[in-house]
Image: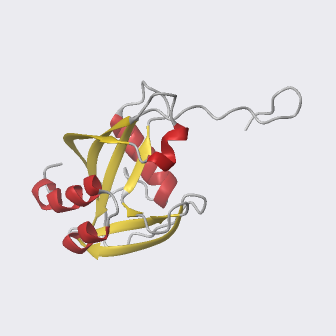
Amino acid sequence: MAAEPGGGAAPRPFKIPESVLVVIHTAALDVLLIRRADAPEFWQSVTGSKDVPEEDFRATAVREVWEETGIDAQAPGCILCDWHLENVYSIYPQWLHRYAPGVRENTEHLFSLEVPAGTPVTLHPREHVAWRWLPWREAADACYSPSNAEACLLLPRFVGAG
């Protein structure tokens, strides 16, 4: 963070209310879930907002997967699939302060990422504290977010749709 005159930290820019949800899975439909550091009851797939409004959703997905799991979505054996679906949902109250005043909803663009079984996971410790692979139905049951649970349940429809 850049320092402002007088020694203070520069204010963090507001999050852009356009994000991705990436369901990472194996060919056997085991789904990777990660547990948030700031809400330990919150198991989820990879999520994240655009860095700039012009960033396309695919680039956001690749970046967020790398930042949150250490997985290169463009590596051999990986298949990133744009589902061409979006969810619009109310932002949880505890995270509204991250957005500009008056922003209450986020648009989430859905992807899946097939990875080879045994792909190593390296979490960003400020964001996530644990990970686990679960069969897709169990993953849906474990997700805190209804839109994430629904995405896990839709996964078999999109496998191989590349």
Marks counted in the figure total 0
x and y, in percent, of residue 28 in the image: 20, 72
x and y, in percent, of residue 29 in the image: 21, 69
x and y, in percent, of residue 94 in the image: 50, 49
Q: In which quarter of the image is residue 104?
A: top left
Q: Which residue, as the protein is rendered here, is positioned at the far right? A: 6
Q: In which quarter of the image is residue 126?
A: bottom right
Q: Relative to residue 25, is residue 52 drawn left or right? A: right
The foreground one among 60 and 128 is 128
The foreground one among 76 and 153 is 153
x and y, in percent, of residue 129 in the image: 54, 68
The foreground one among 147 and 51 is 147
- Res 4 visible: yes
Q: Relative to residue 113, is residue 17 drawn left or right? A: right
- Res 77 visible: no
In which quadrant is the N terminus drawn?
Answer: top right
In the depicted structure, whether residue 20 falls above or below residue 135: above
Measuring 56% from the left and 60% from the top, which residue is drawn there? 124
Measuring 37% from the left and 61% from the top, which residue is drawn there? 44
Colour scheme of the rendered structure: secondary structure
Measuring 47% from the left and 60% from the top, which residue is drawn there? 69
